Image (cartoon, rainbow, N blue to C red):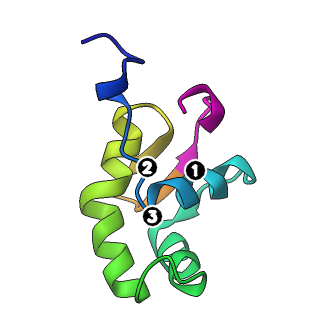
C-alpha cells in the first residue's frame, strides 16, 4: 500500500484528533506528562496516568508512523512535524 492511501492513515480516535490539534497550535516540543495532563484536563481521558500509558504505547507511535508527530520514547518528548492534519483527512 502506498503512503496516503486510506488504510495507511491513523484512526482519529478521541486521543489522536486532539493531539494533532495541540501540535497545530504549538511550535515547541511537549513532554508526555504535559500531553497526558492536557488530555485529562479536557476530559479526553479519564485521568493523566491512563492517558500517559495509552499515548506511549499506542497513539504517539501510530501518529509518528504516518509522519504527523515525532516521539522520542527515551526522552518522552513529542514534537509536531511540517505535515498538517487537513492534508490527511
Position of the C terminus, as image quadrant, is top right
**Label 1 secondary element:** helix
Q: What residue appears at the point 35 percent right and 64 percent down from the top-left corner? A: 55
Give the residue at mark 1: 20
Q: What residue appears at the point 53 percent right and 83 percent down from the top-left corner? A: 43
Q: Residues within 10 Å of mark 2 (few under 14, many from 20)?
A: some
Bounds of the magenta segment: 79-89
Give the residue at mark 2: 12
Give the residue at mark 3: 14
Gap between marks 1 and 3 measured at Cα: 11 Å
Closer to viewer: mark 1 or mark 3: 3
Q: Where is residue 50 shown, x and y percent of the image?
A: 32, 82
Tell which circle, 2 or 1, labels the residue nearer the N-terminal end.
2
Q: Where is residue 77 shown, x and y percent of the image?
A: 48, 58
In-image side of 7 versus 81 (left or right): left
Which quadrant of the view contains residue 62?
top left
**Label 2 secondary element:** loop
Gap between marks 2 and 3 measured at Cα: 7 Å
Q: Are marks 2 and 1 in contact (CB under 8 Å)?
A: yes
Position of the N terminus, as image quadrant, is top left
- Can residue 73 be seen from the camera position used here? no
Q: What residue appears at the point 59 percent right and 86 percent down from the top-left corner? A: 41
Q: What residue appears at the point 36 percent right and 45 percent down from the top-left corner? A: 11
In-image side of 75 versus 30 (left or right): left
Q: Where is residue 35 shown, x and y percent of the image?
A: 53, 70
Amino acid at each position: 500500500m502506498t503512503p496516503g492511501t486510506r488504510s495507511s492513515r491513523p484512526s482519529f480516535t478521541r486521543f489522536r484528533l486532539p493531539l494533532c490539534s495541540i501540535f497545530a497550535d504549538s511550535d515547541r516540543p511537549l513532554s508526555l506528562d504535559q500531553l497526558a495532563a492536557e488530555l485529562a484536563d479536557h476530559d479526553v481521558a479519564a485521568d493523566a496516568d491512563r492517558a500517559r500509558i495509552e499515548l506511549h504505547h499506542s497513539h504517539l507511535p501510530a501518529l509518528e508512523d504516518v509522519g504527523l508527530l515525532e516521539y522520542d520514547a527515551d526522552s518522552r518528548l513529542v514534537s509536531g512535524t511540517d505535515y498538517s492534519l487537513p492534508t490527511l483527512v
